[in-house]
Each structure stands twice: as C-alpha cells, then as structure tokens.
Image (cartoon, grey):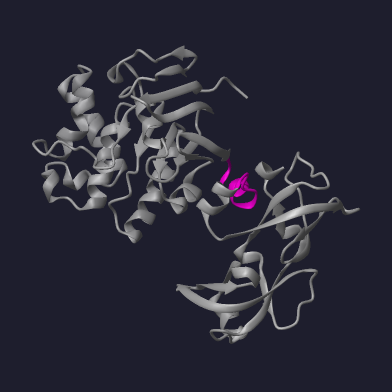
C-alpha cells in the first residue's frame, strides 16, 4: 500500500492531569473514509482537533504526506473542518459563504465566483446563492458548509458530528450526499460521530475509542462480527456475553467451554488460540439466537421472556436465564409473530457453535 496520507505516531494529548488521548497510533490512507466513534469524552473530537491544528499534541507526532505538522497552524494545513454547528457566517449570504476560503487565498473575484457557483450547482444549491443563511433549512445549511469546505479542493475533509442536529430522515439523505461526494472526489474523509449507524453506513474503516484509547480499528463488518473486547461488543450493542472456562479443544477447531449455565462450544478469534483452564468471555449476537420450546442445538439456555421492544420491522426480546443472566434476542416482526410469545413464558435460547465467539482480549 502507498505511503499513508496521515500518520498518528504515539500521539498523546493531555489537559493538565487529564489524559484526553493516550498513545494513539493510526494510519489513514488517501481516498479512505475513516469514522472515529465512541461515547462522549472518549477522545474522538480531540483527535480530530489535533489533525485540524486546533490542538497541539502533548507527545508524539502527526504527519501529513510524510511531513511533521505538529507545529503548523490550522491555516497552514489542507485540513478544512465541518463543525457540528456548521459555523457559517450569518452576515454573508450563501454564495459569499462558499467564496470565503477562495477570497482568503487571494483568488480574483470573477474566478472565485465562478468556482463557488459551480459547487453550489453540484450540491443543488444554485437557486439559493443570494439567500441569507438564516432562511435555509438544516439540510441546506449542511450542504453550504460542505461546499465552503470543498470549494478549495483539499486532499482531506474533517467532519465533527455534522449530522447530529438533523432529523433521522434528513440525516440518512445527507449520508448519501456525503458518501457520493467522497467517492466522486476521491478525497479522504475523517468523520467523528457517536452514531454507529452513521459510521457503519458510510465508512471504509471505523476507529472505536474509549477513555482516550483505541479499542479496535477495522471495517464495519469486522467490528460487528468480531469485536475484540467486551467494551466494543457492548458499545455496538446487540451482543450477549457469557463468562466461561476452557475445558478442551474440538477436532474442528472449536473450543469446549464450561460455564455456570452449562457446557458450550465457541470459535476462537482469528490468530489466537485458547488453552485449557483459561477464563474467557464468549460473545453471541442477538440476531444469531433462535427461540424454541425444545432445544435441538448443544448451545442453549433455559430462559423466560421478561420484555420486548418494537423497533419498526424488528423486535428486541429480553430474556432472563439462571442466576439473573440477561439475554437479548433480535427477530424480525414476522418471526416474532410466528413465535406467539407472552411475558413470563419459558423458552430455550439456542445458537450454532460458529456463532459464539471468544473475545480476543480474554485470551
């Protein structure tokens, strides 16, 4: 692979005694759409601000195109940032907002106007060129902010939760606009969000952070199917985690386990193997669990139905096993209807051997 566009090399950022980012090592390549996600205070926005030149690393090095940029001011970098609140200039109209960056670069008035109008047309905003910012809808303001950032044709665009203020329908539409632009332009997007649906829908790779540390980096599919640790599994949701002890290895490469809820089989993560006697954590996705009155698979738990949650075409079912074990199951509404379950009903939750994953961090 070619030289990375961006490298975070052992980057640390602290504010007084508080460590906001701890030993961040991350490479971002040209043309990638990378999403950084995590809960509030995890360090994702601080990471973006350091890349934008708004915060300086306390330790380590940030390189852009192989050049150390720790000491460069924000206006010396080609890293425009689309803010959560968009930060449009209310005293300028739409066209003037888009022209602003070109004017700061000294481009002649006629040339910058032509270029700004081209971007307004590209984003479907040409009819609003002379309109005040206050007269635009949320989605229209979002597109103006994008046009203002992209009109200078930077190699990379940084976005700090740009869709958080939009309603769900408009947010989904804007996700399509963003991914379409990124693919058409071939530039790098670094996108900060707390929303899993946004990150998984748009990004090539996702960086999950917690308490200033990177917990996992991978494609959306990799992270969803093979979370590395309990934090990631619980953060992305819909995962059931059981504690167990390794008692043997199966001829098919599966691991034999014993838990306080009974025996089970699970697969080890990619490049790690289990040893007899190890205490491990086993993860089973809610959508991989079947419910039945008579178990037919060796991996099963006796449970009772304690609650349900309708989420459109899907239903989350909440079960309780022995010793207060909580089990979440996700079914389509059609499958849920066929089950005909009622509160308090006794059922068995069962799953295939290959659908149980031993978490990497527990080995």
The spot of residue 32 in percent (x, y) is 51, 34
- Tell which residue pokes out farthest to the left in this image: 91
- Left or right of 179, for residue 239: right
User: Residue 86 in the image: x percent, y percent?
Assistant: 24, 40
Quarter of the image for residue 360 reads top right
The spot of residue 193 in percent (x, y) is 40, 44
- Is residue 98 shown left or right of residue 357? left
**Above or below, 14 relative to 353:** above
The boundaries of the magenta stretch are: 218-229
Identified at 52% across, 57% down, the residue is 237
Q: Quadrant of residue 115?
A: top left
Residue at position x 61%, y 65% from top? Answer: 287
Say if the magenta span includes residue 52.
Answer: no
Give x and y (percent) for residue 42: 42, 39
Who is closer to the viewer here, 114 or 153?
153
From where the camera sits, is residue 113 visible?
no
* Quadrant where the image shows the N terminus: top right
In terms of depth relative to the viewer, which is nearer, 86 or 40? Answer: 40
- The quarter of the rendered structure image containing the C terminus is top right
Query: Where is 260 relative to 121, above or below?
Result: below
Residue toward you, 107 or 250: 250
* Residue at figure coordinates x 30%, y 20% from the top left: 74
Q: Is residue 226 magenta?
A: yes
Q: How many numbered circles does the render carry?
A: 0
């Amino acid at each position: 692979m070619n030289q990375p566009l961006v490298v975070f090399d052992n980057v640390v950022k602290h504010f007084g005694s508080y460590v906001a980012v701890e030993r961040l090592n991350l490479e971002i390549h040209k043309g990638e759409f990378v999403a950084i996600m995590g809960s509030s205070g995890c360090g994702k926005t601080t990471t973006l601000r350091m890349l934008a030149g708004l915060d300086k690393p306390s330790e380590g090095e940030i390189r852009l195109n192989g050049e150390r940029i720790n000491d460069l001011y924000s206006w010396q970098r080609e890293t425009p940032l689309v803010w959560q609140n968009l930060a449009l200039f209310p005293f300028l109209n739409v066209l003037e907002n888009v022209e602003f960056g070109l004017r700061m670069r000294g481009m002649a008035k006629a040339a910058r106007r032509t270029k700004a109008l081209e971007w307004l047309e590209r984003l479907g905003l040409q009819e609003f060129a002379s309109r005040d910012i206050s007269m635009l809808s949320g989605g229209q303001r979002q597109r103006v902010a994008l046009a203002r950032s992209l009109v200078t044709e930077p190699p990379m665009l940084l976005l700090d939760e740009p869709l958080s203020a939009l309603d769900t329908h408009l947010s989904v539409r804007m996700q399509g606009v963003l991914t379409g632009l990124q693919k058409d332009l071939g530039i790098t997007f670094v996108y900060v969000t707390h929303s899993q649906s946004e990150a998984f829908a748009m990004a090539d790779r996702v960086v999950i952070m917690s308490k200033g540390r990177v917990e996992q980096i991978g494609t959306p599919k990799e992270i969803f199917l093979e979370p590395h640790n309990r934090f990631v599994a619980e953060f992305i949701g819909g995962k059931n985690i059981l504690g167990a002890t390794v008692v043997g290895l199966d001829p098919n490469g599966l691991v034999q386990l014993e838990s306080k809820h009974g025996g089970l089989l699970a697969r080890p993560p990619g490049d790690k193997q289990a040893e007899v006697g190890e205490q491990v954590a086993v993860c089973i996705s809610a959508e991989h669990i079947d419910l039945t009155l008579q178990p037919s698979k060796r991996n099963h738990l006796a449970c009772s139905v304690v609650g349900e949650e309708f989420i459109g075409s899907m239903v989350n079912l909440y079960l309780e096993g022995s010793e207060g074990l909580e089990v979440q199951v996700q079914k389509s509404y059609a499958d849920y209807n066929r089950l005909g379950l009622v509160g308090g009903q006794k059922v068995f939750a069962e799953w295939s051997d290959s659908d149980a994953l031993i978490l990497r961090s527990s080995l």
